[in-house]
């Protein structure tokens, strides 16, 4: 992924944006959220933020992932 790029097209079901070591994903449903967390979480990519926006049918779920190198201590970044 390129830094500062929004990966989104009209037919996409989720919104993805990169910003340095961070990847932001906006989902419409909790099922999408579960799927994305399962797919994105690896040894080098951890979920570090979760937020719910809006209510009812307009609700969105914002996931924030930190991508890090192999020897990086991620716990220091989770303040």
Image: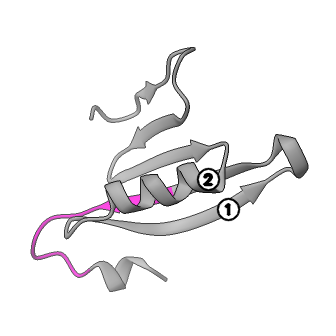
Question: How has the structure been colored for display?
Answer: one colour
Q: Quadrant of the N terminus?
A: top left
Q: In the picture provided, is 29 more to the left or to the right than 55?
A: left
Q: Magenta stretch containing residue 10, yes or no?
A: no
Q: Which residue is mark 1?
A: 51
What type of secondary structure mainly makes up the magenta span?
loop
Pinpoint residue 69: horizontal percent, then vertical percent.
15, 65
Spatial separation of the CA atoms under disc 2 and disc 1: 5 Å
Q: Which residues are magenta?
A: 64-73
Estimate how packed mark 1 is, as few (under 14), some (14 to 19) or many (20 or more) residues with alpha carbons within 10 Å: few
Q: Residue at x 40, y 33 (%)?
A: 4
* Residue projecting furthest to the right: 56
Q: Are marks 2 and 1 in contact (CB under 8 Å)?
A: yes
Q: Which residue is mark 2?
A: 62
* Residue projecting furthest to the top: 10
User: Which sits in the foreground, 2 or 16?
Assistant: 16
User: Which sits in the foreground, 56 or 46?
Assistant: 56
Q: Magenta stretch containing residue 66, yes or no?
A: yes
Q: In the picture provided, is 59 more to the left or to the right than 32?
A: right
Estimate how packed mark 2 is, as few (under 14), some (14 to 19) or many (20 or more) residues with alpha carbons within 10 Å: some
Q: Residue at x 64, y 56 (%)?
A: 30
Look at the numbered disc 1 and give the secondary structure of its residue: strand
Q: Earlier in the sequence, mark 2 or mark 1?
A: 1
Look at the numbered disc 2 and give the secondary structure of its residue: strand
């Amino acid at each position: 992924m390129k830094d500062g790029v929004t990966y989104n097209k009209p037919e996409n079901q989720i919104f993805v944006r990169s910003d340095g070591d961070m990847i932001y994903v906006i989902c419409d449903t909790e099922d999408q959220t579960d799927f994305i967390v399962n797919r994105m979480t690896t040894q080098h990519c951890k979920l570090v933020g979760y937020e719910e926006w809006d209510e009812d049918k307009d609700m969105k779920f914002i996931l924030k992932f930190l991508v890090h190198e192999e020897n990086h201590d991620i716990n220091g970044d989770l303040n």
